[in-house]
Amino acid sequence: MTGSTGRPLASRKNPSTGGKGKEDPLQVFFLSSEVSPVAKTGGLADVSRALPLALAAEGVDVRIGTVAFRGVDALPGFSLRKTFAVQTAEGPHTFRLFEGTLGAGGVPVYALDPGGLFDRPGLYGEGGGEYPDNLLRFSLWNYGLLALPEILGFSPRILHANDWQAALSVPLLPHIQREDLTRRPRTVLSVHNMAYQGVYPLSGWRMTGLPSSYNHFDALEFHGQLSLLKGGIQFADFVTTVSPSYRDEVLSEPEGFGLSGALRHRGNRFVGLLNGIDEEEWNPGTDPHLPVKFTMESLEGKERLKSEMRAAWGLSGSGPLFGVVSRMASQKGLGILARVLLSERNRRKNLGEWVVLGSGDPELEALWRDVAARYPGRVHLKTGFDEKLSHRIMGACDFLFVPSVYEPCGLTQMYAMRYGTLPIVNPTGGLRDTIVPDRTGLWLSALTEEGILEGIVRARDLLSRQKKMREMRLLAMGVDSSWKGRAKDYISLYREALALPPWHLPRR
Ligand code: ADP
Ligand code: GLC
């Protein structure tokens, strides 16, 4: 043990937050580095907004701990609430706390800035590379988060950490709340993607503040390095991931990215809970990003959006309009899709028209620029992050292509369904769990060139069978993917965690 406590340096009187007249609500502290609209690189941000809002609607007193990335103070309703000092593994450290709220119910969001370390253009890095001090940045952030409940007079019974960025809080918690075993929260770690683990050289161990007994194969040690995600997996009371199928997949390699053994060890304390979507934000009848709205009863609006998008981008043909909205990462299968479109053999085939929105890996972006250059008037590419355009693509397209190599859950296929845009997916992970083949979308027969070509041909045929197409669109639009029911699964899990003895006692 380093002697660090993570406690605030000055003791403060706790303002009372509980006892609102009724019985005590379940208090949950939800930790995530990305929360839309504070910061977003992918689906984690959507989930970290929509799930807490759905929990709050069920009566949970949920508060979100996140990062004060650059620009947080410019967000409507966010302001600096206080500055405080915490004893961290690095010694006393000063944090700035920005506070705002989400949703009509006003879910509190606490965005922490450990001394300017997140005031940068990127979240985790720039130009495809990681910031070299990420271990320091996120260790300090975890220390700050764990100090917050006492500073704010909040007594969470559940600490719900998401992904590697917040995973250190799980093993660190008992070393910070040492004296009060009964009041210490139970912990849940949600893993949104096994590929991102927060693995760093052991030379940085000191920054975690954990005793050296945790530098062990059955704790944070991972092939001669330290893994923050593994720390969360080993010590959380429950580990979850974001779909039942992905849960099963990551119990083996290579899908477990080296941690399948650790996950198997968790037995039935590792569960797959399917993500939902915010059906108010993604509603074609009210979406402020859509120039024309539509509903199941008035699908003509969708046709207008399609022809307007075609006209705006000089896409001249008829036939299917395929959309892609994705991070450009090897996980997403966009390399093989680009190669199918670039292949000489396919040049004269009718491959439809494409609108592609993506950003990420510079090589994949370059590959897609080649595709767009090869097919002027048939492929429109926009690189970068564009929330408005993502909604418009969902609104205008006939099909959304999601050829992921693996997909923990995936949200875009659920957004697409809501907009009557049929997803064409590689049935893996959450894509398998959310799309019913030939009813609410299409499953690729294989993630190969042939499989993708066949998918394009099937989509073309389907579009020409108007009755069947309309039937499938309506089925897809009618699917309930909302968080309402799915948030209840988390509440049951929290209650189970509270009823069971802790998974682990802290090591000395
Ligand atoms: P992942 O989290 O693996 O990227 P998800 O499907 O769970 O995949 O979530 C992706 C989220 O990011 C969705 O909200 C999607 O609309 C959004 N998104 C991805 N790429 C872009 C982009 N270039 N511009 C705008 N939104 C994007
Ligand atoms: C990750 C996964 C994605 C999932 C999202 C939200 O980014 O890649 O499949 O939908 O997290 O859980």
Image (cartoon, rainbow, N blue to C red):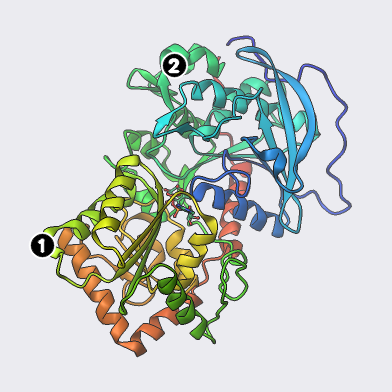
In the picture as drawn, the residue positioned furthest to the bottom comes out as 467
Residue 207, how many percent across, how many down?
A: 54, 16
Q: Which class describes the residues within 10 Å of circle 1: few (<14), some (14-19), or many (20+)?
A: few
Residues 265 and 154: in front is: 154
Please provide percent x and percent y for residue 461.
25, 81
Q: In this rendering, would 75 be left or right of 226?
A: right
Q: Identify residue for label 1.
A: 345
Mark 1 or 2, closer to the camera: 1
Taking 415 as reference, is 387 above or below it? above
In the rendered structure, which amino acid carries the disc numbered 2? Asn
Residue 271 in the image: above or below residue 148: below
User: From this viewpoint, is residue 502 visible?
Assistant: yes
**Distance between mark 1 and mark 2 Cα atoms:** 54 Å
Amino acid on which disc 1 is placed: Arg
User: What numbered label is drawn on residue 357?
Assistant: none
> Where's residue 129, x and y in %?
40, 30
**Residue at image point 55% right, 79% down:** 294
Residue at horizontal 71 percent and vertical 24 percent from the top:
95
Q: Dot 2, crowdedness within 10 Å: few (<14), some or many (≥20)? A: some
Which residue in the structure is indicated by mark 2?
Answer: 215
Closer to the camera in the image, 180 or 408: 408
254, 123: nearer the viewer: 123
Residue at 27 percent of width and 48 percent of height: 367
Is residue 491 visible from the viewing direction of this image?
no
256 vs 269, left or right, is left
Residue 384, position as x, y percentages in the image: 45, 49
Precedes in sequence: disc 1 or disc 2: 2
Secondary structure under tag 2 reads: loop
- State the SS at label 1: helix
Q: Quadrant of residue 64?
A: top right
